[in-house]
Image: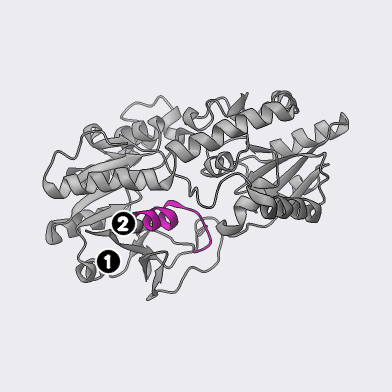
Amino acid sequence: MRVALLSEMFSPNMGYLENIFPKYLARLGVEVHVVAMDLPTQYRSKGGEGLPAGTVQETEGYTLHILGHRKVAGYMRMKGLEEKLSAIRPDIVQTIEAIGWVPLDAAYIKLLRGYKLFTGSHFHASIFPLANKDLSWWNHERLVCTLTRATPGRLVGLVTEKCYTIAEDCADIAVRFFGVPEKKTVICPLGVDTELFRPASGEGERLERDGLREKLGFLESDIVCIYTGRLNDDKNPLLLAQAIAELQRRGERFRGLFLGDGTQLDAIRAQAGCVTHPFVPVQELAGFYRATEIGVWPAQESMSMLDAAACGLPIVVNDTISVAERTEGNGLLYKLNDLQDLVRVLLELRDPGVRRRLGSAGASKMARDFSWDSVARRRLNDYQAALRGNHANEPSC
C-alpha cells in the first residue's frame, strides 16, 4: 500500500501529526509519502522560513516532499500537487484538514487518479468562535462561513471515505460549519510518540533530570509547573505565571517553567518564580517534562497535554475543555480564567503522593490508549477496508 499524507506545513523538529503518524505507519509496512508546502510552521502569525521547495528526503522510514506555494483567494495553495501525486501514484491520500485548498485539490485529483481520500478536522470550539454563537442562517458571519467553508467542504465530503476528528466538538464543527457528512465523521484522538515520551527510567535519565533542574535554577524541593507552546493570549500561559507568583508570595515552593515564545513572554518573565526557555526540538522535550512535577495548560487544548501525561505528569486544565479523556483519572480541573481557583488546584497537587498517583495513571493511559502505534494500526485498517471496497464509514477509532 502506498499512502500520501498532505499537510500545509512541515517542521522537522516538531512532534505534530505530519511528523509522527507517518513514522508509525511506515513501521507497519506502508510506503508513506508526506507532501507539504515550503511554509514556516507559524507562517500565519510571523515570518521565518520553511524547508525549500523541491526538497525530497528520506526521514524516519518515509519520504518527505516539499512543494512551492501561492496565495489564492487569501489562502495557501500547493504548486504542482497534481504532478506530484501522479508521480507517487498513491492508493490512499490523507489530508490533515477537511477544508482549504489542500483537501479541495486532493478531491479533484482523486476524480482523475482514483485513489481513496481521507480527511481530518482538528478545530476545537475553543478556537472556532462561531461554534459558541447562536446565529441564524441569514447572519452575515454564518453566510460567509457557508460560502467559504461549508460549500467547498461539502464538495470534498462527497468523495471522502472518512473524516477523522479528534474530539466530539471537532466533529460537531466539521458537520455544522465545514460541510462534512455526519456519517463520514469518526472521532479518533491524536497520539503520543511513547518511545520519546515516557517516565524517567534508569540512573542515566535521573541524573539528566537533576542536571537540567540545576541548569534551570530549580531546587530539588521545588514543585515545578511546566507549560509548553505559544505564549499568546489565546493560550494564556500568563495566568499560570500569575498563579506561581501568588504561591511564591504565600511562601510555597512552586516554580514555573515556560517553553515557547509569543506576545506574553515579557509579562511571564516579570512574574516571581517563573523561568522561560525557547522552543526545543521534539527529541529534547521529554527531558523537560521529566524534570518537572505538574503540566498546566490554562486555556486551549494542546497536544502537549498528551506528551506530558505520557511522561508521568499530572495535568491541570480548565473546566471547559472538550477532551476530557485526556485528563480523566490523571488530572484536575480549574475554573477557566479564575486565578484563585488555579492556585487552589495547584495546592491540591502539593502532596507528592497525589502527584505520583495521577502521574502514574496518566502514563499508563497514554501508553495503552493514545500511542501513535495504536492510532496508525486503526487508520491502516480503515485504509485497507476502503481499498477492499468495504463500507468505510463504520466506526474505527
* Image quarter in which the N terminus is found: bottom left
Q: Earlier in the sequence, mark 2 or mark 1?
A: 1
With respect to residue 275, does 393 lie above or below?
A: above
State the residue in front, 21 or 155.
Answer: 21
- Which residue appears at 60% of the width and 41% of the height? 235
With respect to residue 160, does 43 lie above or below?
A: below
Residue 15 in the magenta stretch? The answer is yes
Task: Residue 120: give its label.
Answer: none
Residues marked 2 and 1 touching at CB (< 8 Å)? yes
User: Badge 2: few (under 14), some or many (20 or more) residues near its Cα, within 10 Å?
Assistant: many
Q: Relative to 265, is 195 on the left or the right?
A: left
Q: Relative to 271, is 119 on the left or the right?
A: left
Q: Kindly identify the amino acid type of the residue bearing the numbered disc 1.
A: Leu
Residue marked by disc 2:
102
Q: Kindly identify the amino acid type of the residue bearing the numbered disc 2.
A: Val
Residue 322 visible in the snapshot: no
Find residue 65 and report its horizontal and vertical position in percent.
Answer: 35, 69
Secondary structure predominantly adopted by residues drawn in magenta: helix
Q: For the magenta stretch, what is the residue range?
A: 12-26
Q: Secondary structure at mark 1?
A: helix
Residue 193 in the magenta stretch? The answer is no
Residue marked by disc 1:
81
Q: Residue furthest front?
A: 202
Q: Relative to 299, is 54 on the left or the right?
A: left
State the residue in front, 360 or 247.
Answer: 360
State the residue in front, 93 or 198.
Answer: 198
Q: Relative to 247, is 374 on the left or the right?
A: left
User: Hey, which quadrant is residue 70 in on the image?
Assistant: bottom left
State the residue in front, 387 or 121.
Answer: 387
- Which residue appears at 27% of the width and 38% of the height? 179
With respect to residue 243, does 71 lie above or below?
A: below
Q: Secondary structure at mark 2?
A: helix
